[in-house]
Amino acid sequence: MQEVGFTPQLAASPIAGALWLIPALPMLAAGVIAFLKQPRKSLAKALSIGSLGMSLMLALVAFGHVLGGWAHGAAVRETVNFTWLEAGATQVDLGWVLDPLSAVMLVMVTFVGLLIFIYSTGYMEHDENVTRFFCFLSLFAGAMLGVVIANSLLLLFMCWELVGLTSYLLIGFWYHKPSAAAAAKKAFLTTRVGDVFFLLGMVWLFSQTGTLLFYNHGAGSMEPTALAGLLLAPAGLGLTAAGAIGLLIFAGAAGKSGQLPLHVWLPDAMEGPTPVSALIHAATMVAAGVYLIARVYPLMEAGSLAGSTSTSLTVVTWVGAATALFAALVAVAQNDIKRILAYSTVSQLGYMMAGLGMGGVAVGMFHLITHAFFKALLFMGAGSVIHGCHEEQDIRKMGGLRKEMPRTFVPYAIGMMALSGVPIFFSGFWSKDGILEAAQHWGVAKGPFYMLVVGAVLTAFYMTRQMSYVFFGNWRGHGHAHESPAVMTLPLAILAFFAMALGALGTPAWPWFRAFLENRAAGVEVGLLGESEFLGMLATSCVIVAVGIGLGWMVYGSKSPAAEEPDAIERALPSVWAVLRDKFYVDELYAVTVIWFYAAWARVADWLDRCVWGGAVSLVSWAFKGGAHLSRLCDTYWVNGGFDKGCEELANGGGLLASVQSGRVQRYLRLLALAVVVLAAILIWSSRG
Amino acid sequence: MSIAFWIIATLTVVAALAAVLLRNLVHCALSLSLTFAGLAVLFLQLDAQFAGFAQILVYVGAVAILVVFAILLTRSSETPKDGGVFSPTWLAGLAVAAAVFATVAGAIVYSVNGLPNAQAVPSVTVLQIGQALMSRYVLPLEIVALLLTAATIGAVIIAMHEKPATKIGGAK
Amino acid sequence: MFAKLDQIFILLRDWVVSFLPANWQGIAGVVLSVVAIIAVFPALFAIAVLLERKGLGRMQNRLGPNRVGPFGLLQPVADGIKSLTKEDVVPTNADHVVHFLAPVVLVTVVFMGYAVLPMGRNMTLARMDAGLLFYFAMGASSELTIFMAGWSSRNKYSLLGAMRGVAQMISYEVPLLMSSVAVVMITGSLDLDKIVEAQNQYSWGLPHWYIFTPWGLAGFVMYAIAATAETNRSPFDLPEGESELVAGYFTEYSGFKFAEFFLGEYVGMLSISGLGTTLFLGGWSSPLEVLNWVPSWIWFFGKVMMSICMFIWMRGTLPRIRQDQLMNFAWKFVLPMTLLNLVVAAIWRFMGDGLLRWVVCSAILVLMYAGVGLTGMRRKHFGPRSYRYAE
Amino acid sequence: MTPLAGYLLVAALLFAIGLAGALTRRNAILVLIGVELMLNAANLNLIAFWRYGPHPEALTGMMFAIFSIAVAAAEAAVGLGLVISVHRHAQTADLDQMNRMKG
C-alpha cells in the first residue's frame, strides 16, 4: 500500500479545534452527576445521555469533515498541540489529532456508547445506585474518547489509566458481592502489569525522540525522522529501540485488550453489570489496546531486529493468533452466558491483533468496528436474556427462550451469525474474511492462518452451542421468563441493523473502509468478487461456518439436556473438557507462580519490617525519649520559672491597663477627644513656633 | 457677614443646644431635625443648593424619622425618673467638649487673617455634579452604594427579631 | 390675543408691581405670587372636597351634600366657617407645643412644595436648578409633622396612626423618587421647567409626553400608586383608617387645626398630582398641537383636577388593604418595578431613535410585569399576617 | 471677620455641642444624636471650605459633603439598629448600664 501524504495542515479547522469537547462533555456530565446532592436518577440519566448525544453530534461533524477532505483527494490529519509543562530544556506537549482513524473510532465509540447508555436506563432500572452508575459510565466514555483523540502518547496514557480506573469501578459496581470486588481488583492489577511496560516504553520513547506527540508537522514521534532515529538506536538483545519500544507498548495493549498471557481478568470482569460488559469489555475499552497498536502502527512497522525486516508486528501476530485459538477453545466449555461471550471477545481481540499484524491497520480496525457492534449486540442480548430470566446466567438453566423473548432472539441470532461469520450478509464475515485473507498471504509463516481457521470453526461451534442452549429446546429454569422493555430491545434492533449493514463498507469489491483509513481513493471493482482467490476465501469461510454450526447443532441441537446432567462433550472426552472448563489452569498457574512469589516476598518484607527496621526505629525512639526527659527536667525547673515570673509581671501590667478599659463608651470617647485636643494644641504650637 | 446668616446660625445653634439639653428625647429629636433644616439653609447660603436639599431629604426625611422610631421602640420617650438624663460624669464630658471647642475656635481665630475672603459665586449646576459623580467620583459613588446596601441589610438583621409567622396580630 | 391670555397672570403681576418703587418690585412680585398660590389652592381644595363628597355620594347611591346653596355648592364654605368657629380642644396631658406646631408645619411644608411647580408657561414661582429635589425634600419633611401630630396628642390611636403613616410614607417615598428619577434620566435635568419644555414638542400633532413611552407609562403607574400611598389616600389610607383607629393621627385635633390637616392633605394631593402632571403628562403643554392656543395654565389645572377625579374614583372603588400587604406591596413589587423601569429608561436613552427601542423596552416591561404579577397572583391566599417590626 | 470664619465658628460650636451631648447624656440614642451633630458640623466645614476655597469648580468639598451625608445615613441606620437590639437584650438604652466589656 502506498501511503498518499496527508494534506499538510495549515490551521486547525474549527471542528478540529473543538475536538476536545467530545471527551470533555461526558466528563463534565460525570463531574456534575458526582456533585448531585441526592440521587437524582432521571437527571443523571438525562445528563449522561444528553452529553454523550452531543459528543456523537460533534463526532459525526468531525467524521464528515475528514470525509470531505478525503473526497477532495487527501484526507485531513489535523493536530492541535500545546505545551503541557516545561522543565528546563525539555518540554512535554499534549494535543489531539483528527484523522480517519480517530474519526472512525470517535463515531463508533460515541454511537455504541449512546445505545448502551439508553439500554442501561432500562437495565439498571431497579438499582438504587443508578446515579453512581451513570457517573462512572460518563466518566468512562469521556476517558475512552480521550484515548481516541489523543495525539500524544502521554495524554493517551492518562486517559488510558482513567479508563482502567473506571473499568475497575464499574466491574466492582456491585462491590457488596465479594466475587465482584475480587474481579475488579484482578482486572486492575492485571492491566497494571501491562501498563507498567507501557509506561516504560513511553519513557524510553521520550528519551529517544524527545517528544511524545504522534504527529507534529514532521517532528512527531510517529513520523519518518523520529522513526529513522529509533531504527538506528540499538537496544540490546539485537533489538532496535523501535522494536523494543514497540514490544513494550504492545505489552500494555495486550494487558488492556486481554491478550495472552494477560487475558485472565477479562472473563472475571463479567461480574460487572451487563451494560458495562457490553460497553467496556466488548465494544470500547478492550478495543483500546488494538486502537493503540493502530495508532503507533508506524512504530510497530519499523524493523525491530537490527538489520532484518522482521518487525514487532510478528510478535503481535503470533500472540493474537494464539489468543484467538486459546480463548475459542476455552469458550467452548463455559456455562455462564456472559463468560462465553467474554472468552469469545478475547478470541476476537486476538483476531484483531493478528489482523493488525498481518494485514495492516485497516484490516484490524475494520474487524474492531464490526466486532464492536455485534459484540455489544450480543452482550446486550445476553443482558436482556439475563434480565428476562431473573438474573439467571447459567445457560443450562435456560432454553426455549426463542418463544418467550422473540424481540431479543432475532437480534441475538443476527449477532451470533455475524460473530461466527456467516457469509455475505453479515459484517463479521467480511471483517474476519479480511483477516484470514491477510493471514493466508502472510509471508512469514503459515501457522497463524491455521490457528485462526480453527478458531473460526470453534467460534461458530460455541456460538451454536450457546444459541441452542439458550433459545432452543425447552425451558429448564425456574419461574417464568419475560420479554425485556422496549428501551432495551430497541438498541438491540439498531445494533443488529449495523451488524449486518456495516459489512458493505469492507467488501473487497468496494474496500471503502480500508481506502478511507489508508487514505486512498475507493473504487468499485465488482470484478474482484469473481476472482478465484476471493471465491476461494468465500468457500473456505462457508466450509468453516458450515462445519462449526453443523457440529454444534449435531452435538447439542434442540435437544435440551437437563441442567445437572453433564455436557455432551464432557461425556465424550471428559479430560479434555475438564482442561477447557478450567481454562487451561492459567489462573491456577498464576496462583502458584506469580502470586505465590509475591506473597512470599511480602512475608519476607513484613518480617524485615517487624524485626530489623522496627527494632532500629524503636531504638532511635528510646534515645529520643531519653533526651525528652532531660529537656523536660530543665524546662520545668529552669525555663518555666523565669517564664512564670515574666508572665506575672505582664499580668500585673495588664491589670493596670485593664482598669482603663471600663467598658464605658463615653469614657473612651472622652479620652479620644482629649487626645484630639492635645494633638491639635501641639500642631498649633509647632506651627506658631 | 449677612444678617440672614447670623439669624440662621443662631437658630441652628440654639436648636442644636436644645437637641442635646432637652430632657424629653422626642423633643431632642425634633429640635435635631430643626438643626438639620438650619444647616440645610446654611448650605443654601453657601450656594450648595444640591447639598442643601440632599441634607433635608436625607436628614429631616430619613435620619430624624429613624431616630424617632428608635426612641419609641426603646421606650425612652418618657423622661427617666431615676437620676436624671445626664451621666454621673457629665462634668468631665462638658469640660472635654469645652476644651475641644476652645482648641478649634482658637485655631480659627488665630488663623482668621489667613482665611480667603469672599470668592465669586461658583455656578454649579446639578448637571455638573451628576457628571462629576459619574466620571471622576464614580468609584466612591459605587462604594457608597455598596455601603448603603450593606448598612440596610445589616440594620434590618440587627434590629429585626422574628416572630413566628403564624401568630396573628401582634402589631406594635 | 391668546398669547396675552396665556400670560395673563404674569402681566397682571407685573402691572401691579409696576406701581412700586423699583428696588421693591422683585420681592413684591414674589410675595404677590405666593399670595396667589395661597389663595388659589385652598379654593381648589374646596372644589375638590365638594367634588369628592358629591362624587362619592353618587358612587354610593346617595345624593351627597345638597342643602347649602344651589345643589349644595356652598357646602365647603359652610364647612370652613364651622371649623373656624369650633372650639379648639387640646388634651390635657398632650404636648402642647408640638401639638400646635404639627399642623402649622405640615401646611407650610406642603405649600412650599408649590414653589417649583410650573403651573403654566413662565408660571414657576422659584425656578431652581434642583427643583425636583427641593420638592421631594419638602415632601420628606411632611412626614415628621405627621409623627409630631400623632405623638404629641398622647393617644394610642393617634400614635398608631402616626407610626403607620410615617412607615408607609417612608416606604412609598422610595418608589416615588425612583419613578421620577427615570424622567430625570431622560431629560437630564432636575429643573421642572426643563422637564416640561422637553415634553412640549409635537410630532404629527401629538405631544411628546413621557406617558406615551413604555417606561413613561410604567413609571406613571408606579408614580400614581406611590402618590396615592404618599397622600394617605384610599386604598392606602390606613393611617386614618376610621374602622381601626378613630381618625388616625389627627384624632385629637379639632376645629381649625383639624381643618389645617384636612387642607394639608388635599393641598398635598393637588401638589403631588401637579408634580405627576409635570413629570409624565407634559405639564402645561396641550395634548394636541392644534390646541396650543388654549392658555397653558388651563391645561395644567385641567390635568390636575382630572387626576384628583382619579383619586376620588379610586377611593370610591377600592377597599382598604392591610398593613403588611401594604408594606409587602411597596418593597416587593413597586420598588423592584421602579428599579426595573430605571434600567428600561436607560436602555431607551441609549438605544437612540427608531422602532427597535420601542419593541425592546415594551417587551422587557411587559415580560417583567407579567412574570412578577403572575407569580404574585399565584398565591391566591394572603399569607398569615406577619409583622417583623423591631421592638 | 471673613464669612468663612463665621461658618467655621458655627461649625466648631455645633461640633462641640454634639460632642458635649455625646459625652454627657446617658441615653444611647442621644449619644447618636450628638454624633450626627458632629458629622453635620464637619459637613458644614467641608461646604464652607469648598465655597471659599481656591477651586470651587472642582467640586471637591461638595462631593465630600454629599458622600459624607450618604455615609452618615448608613451610620445612623446601623447605630440605631444596634441600640434597638441592645435594648432588646438589656431592656435599657442607658449607656452606664452597658459596661459588660470592661477589661
Image (spheres, rainbow, N blue to C red):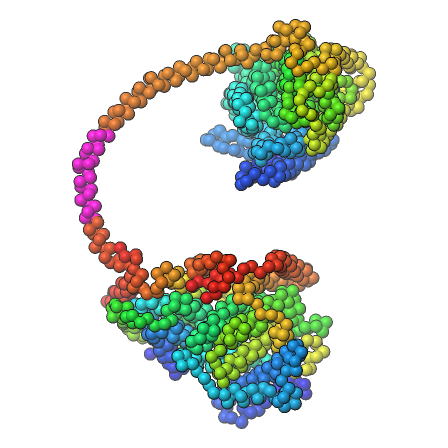
Q: Residue at horizontal 43%, vertical 82%?
A: C90
B118 left or right of C126? left
Q: Position of residue A173 (x, y in %)?
A: 56, 28
Main secondary structure found in the magenta portion = helix
C163 left or right of A522? left
Number of callouts in the render? 0
Q: Residue furthest front?
A: A479
Q: Is residue A649 magenta?
A: yes
- Quadrant of the snapshot with the C terminus of chain A: bottom left
- Compare residues C150 and A606 and report the one nearer the observer: C150
Q: Residue at horizontal 51%, vertical 13%?
A: A591
Q: Position of residue A37 (x, y in %)?
A: 53, 41
B129 left or right of A630? right
Q: Residue at horizontal 33%, vertical 67%?
A: D27
- Quadrant of the snapshot with the N terminus of chain A: top right
- Compare residues A451 and A666 and report the one nearer the observer: A666
Determine if residue A311 is in view: no
In the displayed structure, A142 sits above or below B111; it is above
Q: Position of residue A139 (x, y in %)?
A: 57, 32
Q: Residue at horizontal 57%, vertical 17%?
A: A264
Location of residue C94 by image quarter: bottom left
Q: Position of residue C187 (x, y in %)?
A: 59, 69
Location of residue A676 by image quarter: bottom left
- Compare residues A513 and B61 and report the one nearer the observer: B61
In the displayed structure, A266 sits above or below B11; it is above
Q: Is residue A287 magenta?
A: no
Query: From which residue to which does the magenta span run?
Result: A628-650
Determine if residue A620 is in view: yes
Location of residue A170 by image quarter: top right
